[in-house]
Image (cartoon, rainbow, N blue to C red):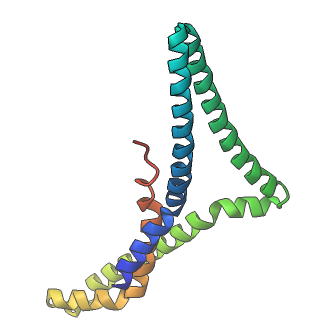
Amino acid sequence: MLSLISTLGGLLISGLPSVLGFFQDKSDKAHELELARMQTERELQMMEKGFIAQQRVEEIRTDQVEMQTAAQMQNAALDHDKKVLERASTWIVNYVGTVRPTVTYIFVAELVAINFWLCYQLFKIPNLITKVDDLTVIGELIFSSDEMAMLGGIIGFWFGSRNWDKKK
Protein backbone atom coordinates (compact mmCIF):
# COMPACT_ATOMS: atom_id res chain seq x y z
CA MET A 1 0.00 0.00 0.00
CA LEU A 2 2.82 2.35 0.89
CA SER A 3 4.51 1.69 -2.44
CA LEU A 4 1.29 2.55 -4.27
CA ILE A 5 0.95 5.80 -2.33
CA SER A 6 4.63 6.60 -2.92
CA THR A 7 4.32 5.95 -6.66
CA LEU A 8 1.23 8.14 -6.82
CA GLY A 9 3.09 10.81 -4.84
CA GLY A 10 6.00 10.68 -7.29
CA LEU A 11 3.62 11.09 -10.21
CA LEU A 12 1.85 14.00 -8.57
CA ILE A 13 5.06 15.78 -7.59
CA SER A 14 6.50 15.37 -11.06
CA GLY A 15 3.34 16.92 -12.46
CA LEU A 16 3.29 19.88 -10.07
CA PRO A 17 4.99 22.25 -12.55
CA SER A 18 2.38 21.30 -15.12
CA VAL A 19 -0.44 21.97 -12.65
CA LEU A 20 1.02 25.38 -11.89
CA GLY A 21 1.43 25.90 -15.63
CA PHE A 22 -2.26 25.05 -16.04
CA PHE A 23 -3.27 27.97 -13.82
CA GLN A 24 -0.85 30.28 -15.65
CA ASP A 25 -2.22 29.00 -18.96
CA LYS A 26 -5.78 29.69 -17.77
CA SER A 27 -4.84 33.28 -16.96
CA ASP A 28 -3.05 33.65 -20.29
CA LYS A 29 -6.04 32.31 -22.18
CA ALA A 30 -8.39 34.77 -20.48
CA HIS A 31 -6.06 37.56 -21.55
CA GLU A 32 -5.84 36.17 -25.08
CA LEU A 33 -9.62 35.90 -25.23
CA GLU A 34 -9.95 39.57 -24.37
CA LEU A 35 -7.34 40.45 -27.01
CA ALA A 36 -9.16 38.29 -29.57
CA ARG A 37 -12.43 40.05 -28.79
CA MET A 38 -10.81 43.44 -29.26
CA GLN A 39 -9.09 42.26 -32.43
CA THR A 40 -12.36 40.94 -33.84
CA GLU A 41 -14.03 44.28 -33.20
CA ARG A 42 -11.15 46.07 -34.91
CA GLU A 43 -11.28 43.66 -37.87
CA LEU A 44 -14.99 44.26 -38.32
CA GLN A 45 -14.42 47.98 -38.30
CA MET A 46 -11.57 47.64 -40.80
CA MET A 47 -13.64 45.40 -43.07
CA GLU A 48 -16.40 47.98 -43.11
CA LYS A 49 -13.88 50.51 -44.35
CA GLY A 50 -12.28 48.10 -46.84
CA PHE A 51 -8.93 47.60 -45.13
CA ILE A 52 -8.51 43.86 -45.76
CA ALA A 53 -4.76 44.13 -46.50
CA GLN A 54 -4.21 46.04 -43.28
CA GLN A 55 -5.95 43.21 -41.41
CA ARG A 56 -3.44 40.68 -42.69
CA VAL A 57 -0.53 42.92 -41.68
CA GLU A 58 -1.98 43.19 -38.18
CA GLU A 59 -2.30 39.39 -37.95
CA ILE A 60 1.36 38.97 -38.87
CA ARG A 61 2.40 41.57 -36.29
CA THR A 62 0.32 39.85 -33.61
CA ASP A 63 1.95 36.49 -34.38
CA GLN A 64 5.41 38.07 -34.21
CA VAL A 65 4.66 39.67 -30.85
CA GLU A 66 3.42 36.34 -29.46
CA MET A 67 6.57 34.52 -30.61
CA GLN A 68 8.83 37.24 -29.20
CA THR A 69 6.99 37.19 -25.87
CA ALA A 70 7.30 33.41 -25.54
CA ALA A 71 11.01 33.55 -26.39
CA GLN A 72 11.60 36.37 -23.90
CA MET A 73 9.88 34.43 -21.11
CA GLN A 74 11.97 31.33 -21.77
CA ASN A 75 15.18 33.36 -22.00
CA ALA A 76 14.36 35.17 -18.74
CA ALA A 77 13.95 31.84 -16.92
CA LEU A 78 17.23 30.51 -18.34
CA ASP A 79 19.04 33.75 -17.50
CA HIS A 80 17.81 33.54 -13.91
CA ASP A 81 19.21 30.01 -13.57
CA LYS A 82 22.50 31.15 -15.09
CA LYS A 83 22.80 34.07 -12.66
CA VAL A 84 22.17 31.83 -9.68
CA LEU A 85 24.72 29.26 -10.83
CA GLU A 86 27.33 31.90 -11.81
CA ARG A 87 27.90 32.70 -8.16
CA ALA A 88 28.27 29.05 -7.22
CA SER A 89 31.49 27.08 -7.44
CA THR A 90 32.01 24.64 -10.31
CA TRP A 91 31.51 21.56 -8.20
CA ILE A 92 28.21 22.94 -6.87
CA VAL A 93 27.01 23.54 -10.42
CA ASN A 94 27.98 19.99 -11.38
CA TYR A 95 26.46 18.60 -8.20
CA VAL A 96 23.14 20.38 -8.78
CA GLY A 97 22.90 18.78 -12.20
CA THR A 98 23.66 15.26 -10.99
CA VAL A 99 21.90 14.85 -7.63
CA ARG A 100 18.66 13.24 -8.74
CA PRO A 101 20.16 11.01 -11.44
CA THR A 102 22.91 9.86 -9.06
CA VAL A 103 20.45 8.93 -6.32
CA THR A 104 18.37 7.06 -8.87
CA TYR A 105 21.39 5.19 -10.25
CA ILE A 106 22.54 4.20 -6.75
CA PHE A 107 19.12 2.96 -5.74
CA VAL A 108 18.53 0.99 -8.95
CA ALA A 109 22.07 -0.45 -8.76
CA GLU A 110 21.30 -1.58 -5.22
CA LEU A 111 18.14 -3.33 -6.38
CA VAL A 112 20.00 -5.04 -9.24
CA ALA A 113 22.77 -6.17 -6.86
CA ILE A 114 20.18 -7.57 -4.44
CA ASN A 115 18.49 -9.45 -7.29
CA PHE A 116 21.81 -10.98 -8.39
CA TRP A 117 22.67 -11.89 -4.81
CA LEU A 118 19.24 -13.51 -4.35
CA CYS A 119 19.66 -15.54 -7.55
CA TYR A 120 23.16 -16.60 -6.47
CA GLN A 121 21.87 -17.74 -3.09
CA LEU A 122 19.02 -19.64 -4.71
CA PHE A 123 21.40 -21.56 -6.97
CA LYS A 124 24.00 -22.01 -4.22
CA ILE A 125 21.56 -23.58 -1.75
CA PRO A 126 19.24 -25.78 -3.84
CA ASN A 127 17.12 -26.98 -0.88
CA LEU A 128 16.34 -23.41 0.18
CA ILE A 129 13.32 -23.22 -2.09
CA THR A 130 11.05 -26.20 -2.46
CA LYS A 131 7.91 -24.39 -3.58
CA VAL A 132 6.89 -21.04 -5.00
CA ASP A 133 5.68 -19.77 -1.62
CA ASP A 134 9.24 -20.01 -0.28
CA LEU A 135 10.42 -17.69 -3.06
CA THR A 136 7.64 -15.22 -2.23
CA VAL A 137 8.59 -15.18 1.47
CA ILE A 138 12.28 -14.62 0.66
CA GLY A 139 11.42 -11.88 -1.81
CA GLU A 140 9.25 -10.10 0.78
CA LEU A 141 12.10 -10.26 3.30
CA ILE A 142 14.60 -8.74 0.89
CA PHE A 143 12.32 -6.22 -0.82
CA SER A 144 10.47 -4.49 2.00
CA SER A 145 7.42 -2.35 1.36
CA ASP A 146 9.43 0.75 2.30
CA GLU A 147 12.05 -0.03 -0.34
CA MET A 148 9.40 -0.66 -2.98
CA ALA A 149 7.72 2.61 -1.98
CA MET A 150 10.97 4.48 -2.62
CA LEU A 151 11.44 2.75 -5.97
CA GLY A 152 7.84 3.51 -6.94
CA GLY A 153 8.32 7.17 -6.05
CA ILE A 154 11.53 7.41 -8.09
CA ILE A 155 10.04 5.71 -11.13
CA GLY A 156 6.87 7.77 -10.84
CA PHE A 157 8.89 10.98 -10.72
CA TRP A 158 11.24 10.22 -13.60
CA PHE A 159 8.88 8.46 -15.99
CA GLY A 160 5.47 9.70 -14.86
CA SER A 161 6.15 13.27 -15.89
CA ARG A 162 6.61 12.39 -19.55
CA ASN A 163 2.88 12.62 -20.31
CA TRP A 164 2.43 15.84 -18.32
CA ASP A 165 4.67 17.80 -20.69
CA LYS A 166 3.18 16.62 -23.98
CA LYS A 167 1.50 19.33 -26.01
CA LYS A 168 -1.67 18.50 -27.90
Regarding residue 112, the answer to whether it shows in the image is: no
Q: Quadrant of residue 132?
A: bottom left
Q: Is residue 92 above or below residue 168?
A: below
Residue at 25 percent across and 92 percent down: it is: 137
From the viewer's side, name the closer residue of 63 and 108.
63
Q: Residue furthest right?
A: 87
From the viewer's side, name the closer residue of 144 and 118.
144
Q: Quadrant of the C terminus?
A: top left
Q: Quadrant of the N terminus?
A: bottom left
The percent coordinates of residue 127 (x first, y second) are 20, 92
Q: Is residue 68 above or below residue 79?
A: above
Residue at 51 percent across and 63 percent down: it is: 16
The percent coordinates of residue 130 (x first, y second) are 15, 91
**Marker count (numbered):** 0
Q: Is residue 109 left or right of residue 141?
A: right
Q: Quadrant of residue 35?
A: top right
Q: Residue furthest left?
A: 131
The percent coordinates of residue 30 (x first, y second) are 53, 45
Q: Is residue 120 above or below residue 64?
A: below
The percent coordinates of residue 40 (x first, y second) are 50, 26
From the viewer's side, name the closer residue of 38 and 149.
38
Regarding residue 115, the answer to whether it shows in the image is: yes
From the viewer's side, name the closer residue of 71 and 86.
71
Residue at 58 percent across and 66 percent down: it is: 100
Q: Is residue 28 above or below residue 129?
A: above
